[in-house]
Image: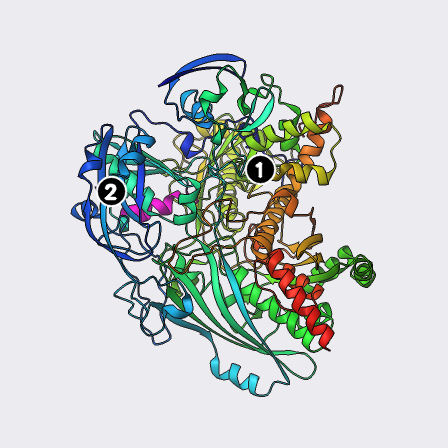
Amino acid sequence: MTTVTMTVNGKSVTANVDPRTLLAQFVREHLRLTGTHVGCDTSQCGACVVHVDGRAVKSCTTLAVSCDGAAVTTIEGLANGAELHPMQAAFREHHGLQCGFCTPGMIMAAVDIVNRKGHVLDEHTIREELEGNICRCTGYHNIVKAVEAGARAMAPGAAAIAAE
Amino acid sequence: MSNTGIGAPVRRKEDFRFITGQGRYTDDIERPGQTHAYFLRSPHAHATIKKLDVSAALATPGVVGVLTGDDLAKDGVGGLICGWMIHSKDGSPMKAGAHPALAQGKVRYVGDHVAVVIAETLAIAKDAAEKIAVDYETLAPVVDMNAATGKGAAVIHDVAPDNRVYDWHLGDKTATDAAFAKAKHVTKLDLVNNRLVPNPMETRAAIGEYDAGNDAFTLYTTSQNPHVARLVLSAFIGIAPEHKLRVIAPDVGGGFGSKIFIYAEETVCVWAAKKVGRPVKWTSDRTEAFLSDAHGRDHLTHAELALDDKGKMLAMRVHTKANLGAYLSTFSSCVPTYLYAPLLSGQYDIPAIYCEVEGIYTNTAPVDAYRGAGRPEATFVVERLVEVAAREIGQDPAAFRRKNFIRKFPHQTPVIMAYDVGDYAASLDKALDLIDYKGLGRRKRDSARKGKLRGLGFSAYIEACGIAPSAAVGSLGAGVGLWESAEVRGNPVGTVEVLTGSHSHGQGHETTFAQLVSDRLGISIDQVAIVHGDTDKVQFGMGTYGSRSGAVGMSAIAKALDKVIAKGKKVAAYALEASEGDIEFKDGRFSVAGTDKSLAFGEVALQAYIAHKFSGQELEPGLKEGAFYDPTNFTFPSGVHVCEVEIDPETGVTKIDRWVAVDDFGVVINPMIVEGQVHGGIAQGVGQALLEGAHYDASGQLVTASYMDYCMPRADDLPSFRVDHTTTPCPSNPLGIKGCGEAGAIAAPPAVINAITDALGHEDVAMPATPQAVWRAAQKAARLAAAE
């Protein structure tokens, strides 16, 4: 067993883990943060995307011990209390989810796209940047719309996306 | 239309938990004392098990149990079943081989279940499984459908010595042959409907739990139809009687058909929970899902269409070989028969149709319903035949379709179905307008100048949904009735719970069903809770598949709501001191006709429960009503999809440049959700046409068993879609709904292939039309053009 310490959603956590424990297992099973999903085990589908030190990472193929000392954000840490993150609000407003299983990874990846590419994203860029995330329900049409709107809403001073 | 009633694009009530990571899927559940199961699977496609020694695995620290097919047999646990009886042409029943949840002496596909190891952690279970010694004697694998029924092929099940499950037919052979004999033109096609893996993003999972104090079981599972799972586990597999078995299907991450069925793993987890005395959890990894989820499609078809001298369709003749895999899955037998051949008339007036289907065993994973189930296969046959026929006789494909459309309703096809209503030309007209059909020639020339090939393909599809009238499916061999149930509970404060037998795994029932209640009772959707997915809460239900939850599930709710309103009128009559006949219900208020006396729904609900005004009368307290709705006909959603592609002949890459969908789903409850269903369906259909294909090698190894080998549609493979609709309300259910869940997956594949073949100068290309396949076809088309 190995001791690992990291900050998850702003809280410091320390645990004794089997060294082969994956980051996805660590947040799901040790911390019971089950919003991070595992869809493929091979870093193809992106349901497991979390942020490690501010960058999108596929937690199903990341060892927990490799994140010792890191700051991890999961989907549970994205909203500011009851106030949704603009990207979360955009996914609801634009019907960017159906079964919801890929959604946490999609939202975390989308926030990372905005962090890297800015607040004005065209359809072509969004579709290329979503290459690492698979959705089987939506055909991506509404996810693309959600990411485009969410990116704009993340800009400083942008109006919040209406709830209805 | 109120802002939350029928027809409003209401944002989904269920979304908050999903976008904040608070969905509760089966694998998110942790039960006290939970153990973890790992299945040892067959590495061989076809082998007998000479010896199975689990002693070393059982002795591994942390292992709590290792169970095999012998243990199942000792406990008298029955095999998995196929619930739809198909009879062959000669009247003989289909040949269903035994399907034990853990192998009993023989394995029949790679991934077949040999033993289960149950341990404190999954890692221990996996490690221990490697210590199980299995002595296999391999047998010749039967992988190719054509070879399976030939002389010398190995026998997969003794009950089917020629590996034929059935040799079935539908239609009038004599009339069809006669029509072909006088035809002016006959179009002939050989078609492959490629094998697919459904791939919901949440893999299957199960937790079995046993309560010794009450001798009762609970199964948490990824099911589209928990009551059917309970029925099969109880009545056929014999785990426990129904009142001692609770099945809970919590949030489910997509199904697409693959979570209808009752599989080995779920069965074993619930049975094993009693054997080891602790909860047993299993979660499929993605490769296990590829190996053991029921696959879809996999047809080889020869089809012919007979035309007269004016291009009028006279008859259709179809012969299909359907791969059913190594065992008959829960509903597999009906998919290539009664969900397929009755749709071969498409949207066309075809006087005679004859279809033969051979169901064939192979040493591959079982094949069963996948989004559309039989109807995409039928639509692919019809719309490829129609497209090629139009090109062969030199008619515009749109005009040729229009000429042959059914125009008078009801219309009895020669293959069972009685279409109730539709306006196929209206959908075609709208689609032609939206795609700018007139500008196609110019766009083709523009592409040609860039060295690209542009093509346009139609798909005028029809499907039979709202599955299904119980008497009709019973007469065709179904072992169950396909009604739906609902219970509406008005609470004393005026809030409402709806308990439904439908199950939502992405469809948004918590919103759309609440919209119906809001519409009928005049209360906010926030006052409504939709309860589903738990056999202890909902009395019974048949579940969600076949685009039935709107047409059948919501019709049951509508019936129950009618009863609630009728009861409310009786209560209001006492409360308002009027006669029941004078009470009217409108916009959420019960009022006395011609007066200003009225009570809101919530006030009447309170009166119903306090019962002060009618105590001692015949009227019972309470405001709870139930209903079962059994449809009187299938519903017939239809529409026209148009795909326009641009192909780079140098690379073979097909880019979908534009997509228009014009669907007639009857009455739409929530257009936002319906459009989302269409988008997703199209994506799966485009996946089949361009990207996806499950491939077994000659030894029966699945060589496409991960997302690195099986090409799933990604965002940059697809365009945005132009989705529109026409409306002819369905006359057979109280809401006028036809169903929308499968349309895109049904319509899309022939639209794509028709577009590609148009671009390639009619050179055929099989699905999936990968860049390599399209490049080869483009090369051949160029050679043929040069030779002319």
Do marks 2 and 1 share a chain? Answer: no
Q: Position of residue B527 (x, y in %)?
A: 55, 29
Left or right: B667 as drawn, with respect to A102: right
Observer-nearest of B84 and B705: B705
Disc on res. B240: 2
Q: Is residue B669 visible?
A: no
Three-letter amino acid code at disc 1?
Asn
Q: Position of residue B426 (x, y in %)?
A: 72, 61
Q: Position of residue B102 (x, y in %)?
A: 26, 48
Q: Position of residue B646 (x, y in %)?
A: 72, 56
Q: Residues within 10 Å of mark 2 (few under 14, many from 20)?
A: many
Tell me where the magenta segment starts and ends, as one range.
B223-234
Q: Is residue B431 visible?
A: yes
Please report the residue visible at 80 percent of the width from the left and 59 percent of the height from the top: B443
Residue B773 falls in image quadrant? bottom right
Quarter placement of the N terminus of chain B: top right
Q: Is residue B148 above or below residue B610?
A: below
Left or right: B440 as drawn, with respect to B473: right
Please report the residue visible at 25 percent of the width from the left and 40 percent of the height from the top: B271
Q: Is residue B733 above or below residue B243?
A: below
Q: CA distance from mark 2 to mark 1?
A: 41 Å
Disc on res. A133: 1
Please report the residue visible at 22 percent of the width from the left and 33 percent of the height from the top: B276
Residue B107 falls in image quadrant? bottom left
Please identify, in this view, whether the residue under mark 2 or under mark 1 is nearer the observer: 1
Name the secondary structure under disc 2.
Answer: loop
Q: Residues within 10 Å of mark 1 (few under 14, many from 20)?
A: many
